[in-house]
Amino acid sequence: MEVAWLFLLMLACGSRVGADGSDHRYKEGDHVPLYANKVGPFHNPSETYRFYDLPFCSPGHVTEKKEALGEVLNGDRLVDAPYELNFREEKQAKSLCKRTLSKGDVGKLRDAVSKDYYFQMYYDDLPLWGFLGRIEKNKLDSSESKYLLFKHIHFEILYNDDRVIEINVQTDPNLSVDITDDKDVDVEFSYSVSWKKTVIPFEKRMEKYSKTSFMPHHLEIHWFSIINSCVTVLLLTGFLATILMRVLKNDFVKYSHDEENVEDQEETGWKYIHGDVFRFPKHKSLFAAVIGSGTQLLALTIFIFLLALVGLEGTNWVRNLLLTGCLFCGPLFLTFCFLNTVAIVYSATAALPFGTILVILLIWSLVTSPLLVLGGVAGKNTFITVALTYFQLAAEDHEWWWRSVLCGGSTGIFILFYCIYYYRARSDMSGFMQTSFFFGYMSCICYGFFLMLATVGFRASLLFVQHIYQSIKCE
């Protein structure tokens, strides 16, 4: 499933809107493909709707573009836009349409303006964004606001020879219509186009979008904090390793003296439980599935496709494999079903069609199942929760298996709590749909981190336990 999602993500990132098979070269007056994509609240990235769900000027027959799988997964729903932006043809105050907005249309547009709705289009593969309107505060009375809908859009297009290089959208607040009151409004939508020559080569026209983004982002890289955290972790790890090595050295010396001096002396400490420490834990099938799923996710994260799943032997291997395959994919599929249902209720573009869902399930069955079987047959894993495991063994508690899993995976729980803090304190997201998508997908991500780090914690503890018991004589 993880490989399938990585494959789909590569498709989503690598796919772009095609220019109807052209080579992106045009002559003056040639038609350049322009597609309207979607609209949605600026602060809710997952909540997007079809462009003509709002009462815009629409052609008599709306033609939908056939999207690729990556575009569908990205929530794109491309349709022909009503604007005509022919190559190097300038237009001034070109009328798009005249229409009377009903009270219902006005209410819908006013709600969109209040939520900072934006629209997205594609022009010759280049994305462009713009806002639908703005809220104007009353200078004398801040409690009163005026809702303005932009009725004119200006397209500024840069070209180099016979190719489109860049496109920008500008809206004029002076050319707007008041939609504050619930009443019918007559409005004439219009647009203008200007062309400017540039020296930017066609091969570098996408660099602008890799450096800047229209969508809101709160990511700030604090290099000093990162370096400080790394140094602190390294120092603490070094101190802990030093202390643990000294304690273990004293234990080895103590046990060697006990064997030489008092043969029948009662054993105490972690040596006393040498007969139980390697005994399989309770619910070993579930334990094997946790370690196997975590190993697979960890291998995927570090781009090593040597998927190793189960490091424990089992008599019911078919059951173990099925449990391993469902342990992560099951909750992920249930979360997807819930979120897709929410998107369908909201008529959002994030809702995947039934055919696309079948394609995803087909990819999952063709890719994940063979890898799952291979991982179940040839499983070996890798290994951190050593100090806590030692303290537990020193207390003569041999049930360290599950505790090492929980200690290692607890970081995933911490990430989930930070997601809650980020949502409430740092983001401007709101609404049931956006909340469902944010916490639904973040829960799946945190669950994946839990499985990966649980595997690391268990394997590190297992190596530690094997090493210390091989270093002493146990009768």
Image: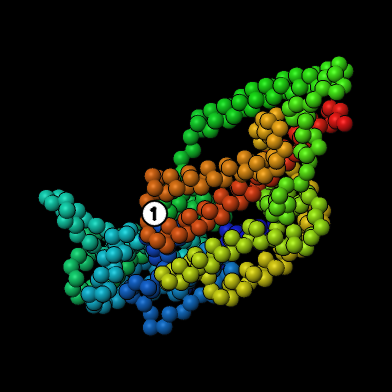
Q: Quick one: 375 or 406, which is closer to the camera?
A: 406
Q: Quadrant of the C terminus?
A: top right
**Residue 158 at x, y = what percent?**
44, 58
Q: Is residue 447 left or right of residue 43?
A: right
Q: Is residue 94 above or below residue 408?
A: below
**Which amino acid does the dot numbered 1 rest on?**
Met
Q: Residues within 10 Å of mark 1 (few under 14, many from 20)?
A: some
User: For residue 407, what is the image quadrant?
Assistant: top right
**Residue 436 at x, y = what percent?**
45, 59
**Residue 420 at x, y = what percent?**
45, 48
Q: Quadrant of the N terminus?
A: bottom right
Question: Residue at the left extreme?
Answer: 140
Secondary structure of the residue carrying tag 1 is loop
Tell me if residue 202 can be seen.
yes
Q: Quick one: 70 or 28, which is closer to the camera?
A: 70
Q: Is residue 101 left or right of residue 87?
A: left
Q: Is residue 361 left or right of residue 446?
A: right
What residue sits 84% from the left and 27% below the top? 472
Q: Is residue 292 above or below residue 113?
A: above
Residue hosting label 1: 429
Q: Is residue 293 above or below residue 345?
A: above
What count of labels does the image hold?
Answer: 1
